[in-house]
Image (cartoon, helix red, strand yellow):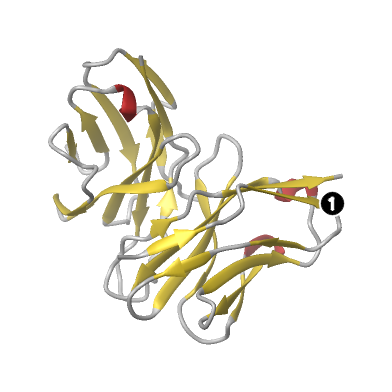
Amino acid sequence: AQSVAQPEDQVNVAEGNPLTVKCTYSVSGNPYLFWYVQYPNRGLQFLLKYITGDNLVKGSYGFEAEFNKSQTSFHLKKPSALVSDSALYFCAVRSGGSYIPTFGRGTSLIVHP
Amino acid sequence: EPEVTQTPSHQVTQMGQEVILRCVPISNHLYFYWYRQILGQKVEFLVSFYNNEISEKSEIFDDQFSVERPDGSNFTLKIRSTKLEDSAMYFCASRPPGVANTGELFFGEGSRLTVL
């Protein structure tokens, strides 16, 4: 079985400060890892993914995520937060043998001006 | 940019009534999904659909649920006799074919179902 944990319901950060949204996963075999963002009244939008290669992956809107195999983590990061980054962020994982990603419960990111 | 569209955006129904949620996936996509999110909980997989049949379903997807692609464009989720616990946001998603595809899904904006 595959699973994702997003331990924080909400993350608060001041504009201009770095942000981190945490995600840990459990999966058989090599993980395929994803981050999605959901703005109010919109669907989930793909941000970035890790399949193989460099542990640091870069995605849309200046976001990046670091894959850490030993800690089974895939934390989302951004060096300098914007108020417009405020949204709900979902981490997802799937195994190589499945095209069904499993999602976490989401983390609400609030960036204060 | 092509997108997945869902209707209705919000539906309120009485317990025991049938509801149909509609989705129009991106036109060249071949794999279709329904997920749901009960308020404050995880986004949960319901069912995946390919080549006009269910390819995978979760234990949530019991006999009260059904999916179909009636006309080659719409992809519908039917809940036969709604229960209070079916109240959730239902997301449709699709993905394109091909071995180069690494599995990211394209989601609609969701249909909020409220069962009274």
Q: Is residue B93 above or below residue B82?
A: below
Q: Between A30 and B110, which is closer to the camera in this rendering?
A: A30
Q: Can residue A63 be seen in this view?
A: no
**Horizontal and vertical percent for residue A63?**
67, 65
From this viewpoint, is residue A26 visible?
Answer: yes
- The secondary structure type at the circle numbered 1 is strand
- Which subunit holds the residue at mark 1? A
**Residue in the foreground of this view, choosing between A31 and A82:** A31
Q: In this view, does A30 lie above or below B101?
A: below
| Crowding at mark 1 (Cα within 10 Å: few <14, some 14-19, many 20+) | some
Marker count (numbered): 1
Tell me residue A11's x, y (percent).
Answer: 70, 51
**Residue at the image point whose x is 43% and y is 48% from the top:** B107
Left or right of A25? Residue B22 is: left
Query: Which residue extends farthest bottom?
Result: A53
Which quadrant is the C terminus of chain B positioned in? top left
Q: Is residue A81 left or right of residue B37?
A: right
Question: At 34% across and 40% down in the image, what residue appears?
Answer: B24
Q: Mark 1 points at which residue?
A: A14
**Quarter-of-image position of residue A47:** bottom right
Tell me which corner region of the image, top left, top right, bottom left or bottom right, holds residue B36: top left
Establish if A3 lies above or below B87: below
Coordinates of residue A95 in the picture (x, y in percent)? 34, 72
Which residue does the image show at 25% across and 36% down from the upper left? B76
Q: Quadrant of residue B79?
A: top left
The residue under label 1 is which amino acid type?
Ala
Q: Position of residue A4 (x, y in %)?
A: 45, 61
Q: Residue at x 86, y 58 (%)?
A: A16
Observer-nearest of A82 and B27: A82
